[in-house]
Amino acid sequence: MPNISSVSEFLLLAFADTRELQLLHFALFLGIYLAALLANGLILSAVACHHRLHTPMYFFLLNLALLDLGCISTTLPKAMANALWDTRAISYRGCAAQVFFLFFLFVSEYYLLTVMAYDRYVAICKPLHYGSLVGSRACAQMAAAAWGSGFLNAVLHTANTFSLPLCQGNAVDQFFCEIPQILKLSCSDTYLREVRALVFSVSLSFGCFVFIVVSYVQIFRAVLRMPSEQGQYKAFSTCLPHLAVVSLFVSTAMFAYLKPPSISSPSLDLVVALLYSVLPPALNPLIYSMRNQEVKDAMKKLLQYMFLDHQ
């Protein structure tokens, strides 16, 4: 029989052993975190304060910025605190909360990106029906469905995972708590229920991925049939940022969870986890503002108001 023990805290994976490197990681994470807070905060403020951005596409962008703020705030602050105070510990409840919020926010973001693909599909392929198919009420319902689905998924998986008896110690091979790492600590004959639930969620995610791909095939076909180059440029300028965000989100997550075990190592897993948990929330605002003139203009006006009008 495995030795089933009661766990009151978990030990997270440390980024470095020496004090100097720990402080360096703290400074690096603090810089990334503040940049992500500023960039996503600017997106939120720009969309909320400028009436020209009160459209379905920017409503979904506002939701994406909120989710990105939540994602990066779930992992980095604890990692920074551990690096600063030279500790690896996280309480049992803190670990459960981290798993819940991370799953909730990541799943909600993925479903929201699927909704955003539908929005772009209707805008480009069915422009005459855009007002009726993607009205304010439909937008609110689709965003609520994305957030609600993420919440229900998170409740299911967190409850399943933390109801499992643990018999492999309390050391988590990651700098934050996540379900696969907790399952490694569970007894070998008890985790199949959560694995089945994960397979179901992955199947839904694959369905969303197929929907996004099919939507973009239709979008590119419609754009290439447009007679004017200006129309093609405008259509691509609204679609390419979303496509880049989806590609970044999916590619980093797929590499993290589908890479072959032969190349897996604690240091590589740490870097990959950093890529998929920190990189998308930090880069998404930059991706959306680089090619979108309306967002750039709104952010410029906001910055001018903040720094010039109050001098």
Image: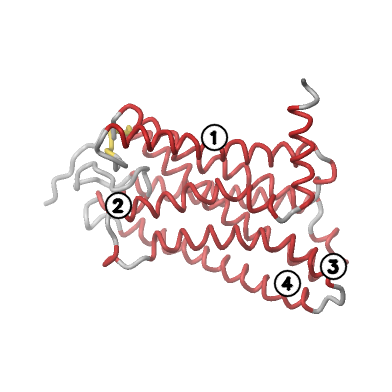
Residue at image point 66% right, 45% down:
63
Q: Secondary structure beneath disc 1? A: helix
For the point 58% across and 71% down, the residue is 210
Q: Residues within 10 Å of mark 3 (few under 14, many from 20)?
A: few
In the displayed structure, does residue 75 sit left or right of residue 205? Answer: left
> What's the mark number on residue 219?
4
Q: Is residue 189 left or right of residue 246?
A: left
Image coordinates of residue 170 in percent, x first then y, are: 23, 41
* Residue at the disc numbered 1: 34
Residue at mark 3 to residue at mark 2: CA–CA distance: 47 Å
For label 1, the crowd category at 10 Å Cα-Cα, with few meaning under 14, some 14 to 19 and many 20 or more, is few
Label 2, on which residue? 267
Note whether 96 is above or below 116 in the view shown: above
**Amino acid under disc 3:** Gln
**Contact (CB < 8 A) between labels 3 and 2?**
no
N-terminal label among 2 and 4: 4
Residue 294 - label: none
Provide residue 118's location: percent of width, then percent of height. Answer: 70, 63
Q: CA distance from mark 4 to mark 3?
A: 16 Å
